[in-house]
Image (cartoon, rainbow, N blue to C red):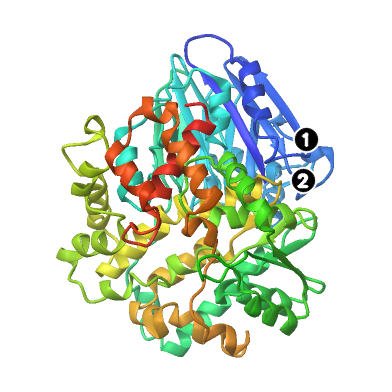
Amino acid sequence: MCGIAGEIRFDGGTADAEAVARITAAMHRRGPDGSGVHASGPIALGHRRLKIIDLSERGAQPMVDPGLGLSAVFNGCIYNYRELRAELEGHGYRFFSDSDTEVILKSFHRWGADCVDHFLGMFAFAVAERDTGVLTLGRDRLGIKPLYLAEGPGRLRFASSLPALLVGGGVDTSIDPVALHHYMTFHSVVPAPRTILSGIRKLPPATVRTVQPDGSSEEHVYWRPQHVRKAEYAGMSAQDWREATLESLRVAVRRRMVADVPVGVLLSGGLDSSLVVALLAAEGQTGLKTFSVGFHATAGESGDEFQYSDLVAEHFSTDHQQVLVDPARMLPAVDDTIAAMAEPMVSHDCVAFHLLSEEVAKSVTVVQSGQGADEVLAGYNWYPPLAKVPRDRGVDAYAQVFTDRPHSDLAAILEPEWLLDHDPSRAFIAEHFAMPGVDETLDAALRIDSTVMLVDDPVKRVDNMTMAWGLEARVPFLDHEFVELAAACPPELKLAHGGKGVLKEAARGVVPDGIIDRPKGYFPVPAIRHLEGPFLDRVRDAVTDPTAKARGLVRRDWLDAMLADPNTKRTNLGSNALWQVALLEMWLQERGV
């Protein structure tokens, strides 16, 4: 797990190695164990290293293989790197390190851009070809690892972090009006390739971009889950699906044990993370370190779920640590969390993950997390209403249960110059729903949630907040083979028992029944859900700051009404509407935009 950066020039000049070095240095928290920059003609690569596999300097990056004429930087982990290495050695390749980075280099030389089809893992990488001047950028299937792009006159820059690209300079920092619309309506998610800033884009998940020396490029989407009932699974009983689900998850957890450092678990006390703990214990991992976070109650809302995480920790005899956050830490943590965001993220879970990661990083360098199960196995409460909706009414039904507000409501919130005469968020949903590879409305909803919303909300949240403390998070529920299996599973099996039914039944006898039968939980951060006192003051300061007034995104009458009554108005999914606007403004101010 690391931070990568680079530049390729198209105007005949040499790459700006100093700018790449600044971009790289800005990501020091993603990779506190080492750094490097390699420049050759029009291409420069930068890297910050977090040592997970091959702790020696032989695994340092940028990695250059003069014999193959290739150089590379890589962020993530290839879980099957040992198997690929053995295969490549059979083809005559010789290795100078024990790292998965070198496996990427050799794999690219052997299979070209199709090397991604051979990788099991999470990754964002760049490979430069010395003899052709071609730069290839790749991102993993579920977008677990980020890759941001900034095009300028005669050049393209890339980095693992959007703010790092700003440090390089020369970026158009104007607000993208379509991205703003997505942020305000599509559950605060800005789908790739857009970001909130006009001058920065992001490589979509499951995409390889090949950049030629003249600046031309092409993108290839190499994977997309098929949410259809496949012939290969015909005749499977409910019991067969339960067994297949558990075995696939068992394989995913086992893959993510690959490391040269200890691996822990973020244990919320919910079914997903508890099952990860159970499967790690079944693999024989002893002395497993588990971690849970909690907050003091506010406005009558409980701030922890320790009773459940304690139950799991005791059952599996883990080395468990409760992190009960002192209220005095909360307000500073809000600003620290915003500083760690690559893009604006509304979820109050971000603060929880940031504070938890700070404590976890003191004990381990790698953790497994239960993130992603709800999106691939229909765990949210908006899925059951979609189950019987005809396909031709699916877009309306999904927009009604998932989007923050209808397009028409923006006229009362945004200043007139930011209003669009069309609804790009609804158009995006319609386009996604119309793509082939889904059988039912629920299938279409699960596909867009698992390949778009999941990527740019929960997954990005985990990456940003863990990497802020040099902590690598691995997500077995997003093993692409597990996702493919879940996509093919009949919807009624996923919706059973209030959602994730097939997983709940598979977990019987594996985790305590009290975890399976408990109400659905989440990372509660009451102080942000209920804005009052110093938290409301912080919000007020942000939205009334002269910078915010000069920016002119939000109507003053709407803001005045919200500040007078900050906790009543909620989005369709229950988020605090004032916090949504304030978070965007605080993020823009943090970035100096």
Which sits earlier in the primary sequence, circle 1 or circle 2? 1
**Residue 507: quarter of image:** bottom right
- Left or right, 212 with reference to 26: left
Label 1 with label 2: CB-CB less than 8 Å? yes
Please, what is the three-letter code of the amino acid marked with disc 2? Answer: Lys
Up the image or down, 388 lies above or below 299; here it is: below
Q: Counting other residues with Cα less than 10 Å from the Cα at mark 2, is it few (<14), some (14-19), or many (20 or more)? A: many
Report the label total. 2
**Residue 192: quarter of image:** top left
Asked whether residue 472 is in view, the answer is: no
What secondary structure is marked by label 2?
A: loop
| Distance in Å between CA atoms under marks 1 and 2 | 8 Å
What secondary structure is marked by label 1?
A: strand
Q: Position of residue 397 (x, y in %)?
A: 22, 65
Query: Label for residue 34?
Result: 1
Which residue is at 55% across, 48% downward?
A: 534
Asked whether residue 438 is in view, the answer is: yes
Between 258 and 272, the one lying in front of the other is 272
Which residue is at 20% across, 36% downward?
A: 420
- Left or right, 3 with reference to 529: right
Q: Position of residue 202 (x, y in %)?
A: 45, 37
Q: Position of residue 30 (x, y in %)?
A: 67, 41
Please, what is the three-letter code of the amino acid marked with disc 1? Answer: Gly
Dot 2 corresponds to which residue? 51
Q: Counting other residues with Cα less than 10 Å from the Cα at mark 1, is it few (<14), some (14-19), or many (20 or more)? A: some
Q: Position of residue 209 (x, y in %)?
A: 45, 35
